[in-house]
Amino acid sequence: MIDPRKPAAAPTAYICDACGGRFEDRLEHAETCAGPFPAIWWHENDGDVLWWCWDGNDWLGEAPYVGSPLDCGITVEMRSGDRPERVIRTDVGGWPGYHTHWTRLPPQPPAPETATTRGLRKST
Ligand SMILES: [Zn+2]
């Protein structure tokens, strides 16, 4: 039942920088819009995506990072040959954290026509 004393909550509308479209549900909008979306829009329900870095003038000329901010690195241990021995533990890999935008992963390609994994066929 609607409480007449309480004003109806107006839905919050956002405007997408990528397509100019208006939306209320970001997750729903990302299903139909190709982006790129600002990094802050990412939600764990978006899963692994492609991450890009805009430097203010252009995209960095590097391949996108594939993954999510939930990616964990691997802890490696380095031992020096010094006496006394020094041991350094650090995390490598994982979420790089400097990307500014993301886009969805492309769909998987169609199944290959042959069972070969080499990708080569003799022409007939
Ligand atoms: Zn959009």
Image (spheres, rainbow, N blue to C red):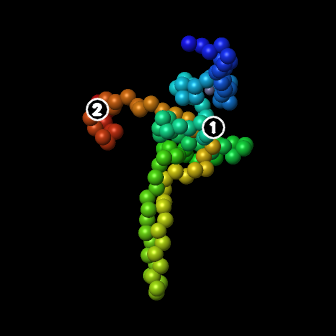
User: As drawn, is 40 to the left or to the right of 115?
Assistant: right
Q: How many residues crowd mark 1 within 10 Å: few (<14), some (14–19), many (20+)?
A: some
Nearer to me, 94 or 2? 2
Does residue 10 sit above or below 72 in this rendering?
above
Q: Position of residue 13 (x, y in %)?
A: 66, 23
Q: Is residue 101 visible?
A: no
The C terminus lies in which quarter of the figure? top left
Q: Which residue is tagged 1? A: 38
Report the amino acid beneath label 2: Thr
Report the amino acid beneath label 1: Pro
Report the residue at 61% width, 40% height from top. 40
| Camera-nearest label, 2 or 1 | 1
Q: Position of residue 23 (x, y in %)?
A: 62, 23
Q: Is residue 16 visible?
A: yes
- Identify the mark at residue 116; answer none if there is no mark: none
- Pick whichever of labels 2 and 1 is earlier in the sequence: 1
Ligand 1 shown in quarter: top right
Nearer to me, 123 or 48? 48
